[in-house]
Image (cartoon, grey):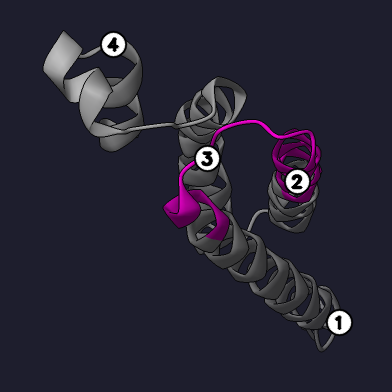
Amino acid sequence: MVSGSRALFGTQEMRAAVGHAVPFVLWFDFLAGFVYLLAGAALLARRNWAGSASLFVAASTLLVFGAFGVHVLDGGTYELRTIGAMTLRSLFWIVVTVVAFRALKKLRVRVPVRVPEV
C-alpha cells in the first residue's frame, strides 16, 4: 500500500520512479492492500468468511492479471517487474485460499461437547 500510494499520490519524482506502471494495476494493488489486511485479520481470527475473503482476493487478482495480459498483448507499455509481482500475488492468494478453506473445514468438524447431566 505504501509503494502504491507513492506511485499514485507522490511527488513527480516518485511517480516517475515507477516507470511504465499500468494505472489500473496500480489502483488495484493500492485498493487491494486494504482487502489483504481485512482478509488476513479474518484468517487470524478464524472467521467463517475468511476463506471467502481470500478467494475474492485471489480471483480479483487473477482477473486483473488477465486484464494486464490483454494490455501487454495490445502493445501497451508496462514494467517487467509487474509480471513477477502479479505472479507472486496470484500464487500467494491461491495458496492462502486453499489452506484457509481446509483449516476452516477442520474447525467446523468439532468433537461434540459433553454437557453434564443435571
Residue type at mark 2?
A: Gly
Which of the two marks, 3 or 2, is nearer to us in this view? 2
79 magenta-colored: yes
Mark count:
4
* Residue contact between numbered discs 3 and 2, judged by CB atoms under 8 Å: no
Name the N-terminal-most of marks 4 and 2: 4
Find residue 45 and report its horizontal and vertical position in percent.
Answer: 52, 57
Residue type at mark 1?
A: Val
* Circle 4 residues within 10 Å: few <14, some 14–19, many ≥20: few
In this view, 2 is above or below 56:
above
- Per the model, the C-alpha gap separating discs 3 and 4 is 23 Å
Residue type at mark 3?
A: Leu
Which of the two marks, 3 or 4, is nearer to us in this view? 4
- Per the model, the C-alpha gap separating discs 3 and 2 is 27 Å
Answer with the quarter of the image where residue 98 lies.
bottom right
In the picture provided, is 17 more to the left or to the right than 26?
Answer: left
Secondary structure, mark 1, is loop
Find residue 3 and report its horizontal and vertical position in percent.
Answer: 27, 35
Label 1: which residue? 109
Q: Over which residues does the magenta segment extend?
A: 62-83
- Per the model, the C-alpha gap separating discs 1 and 2 is 41 Å
Name the N-terminal-most of marks 1 and 2: 2
Secondary structure, mark 4, is helix
Secondary structure, mark 3, is helix
Instruction: Inspect this view and state whether residue 21 appears.
Output: yes
Query: Where residue 38 is drawn, which disc sits there?
Result: 3
Answer with the quarter of the image where residue 16 lies.
top left
Find residue 32 and report its horizontal and vertical position in percent.
Answer: 55, 34
Which of the two marks, 4 or 2, is nearer to us in this view? 2
Name the N-terminal-most of marks 1 and 4: 4
Query: Where residue 9 is drawn, which disc sits there?
Result: 4
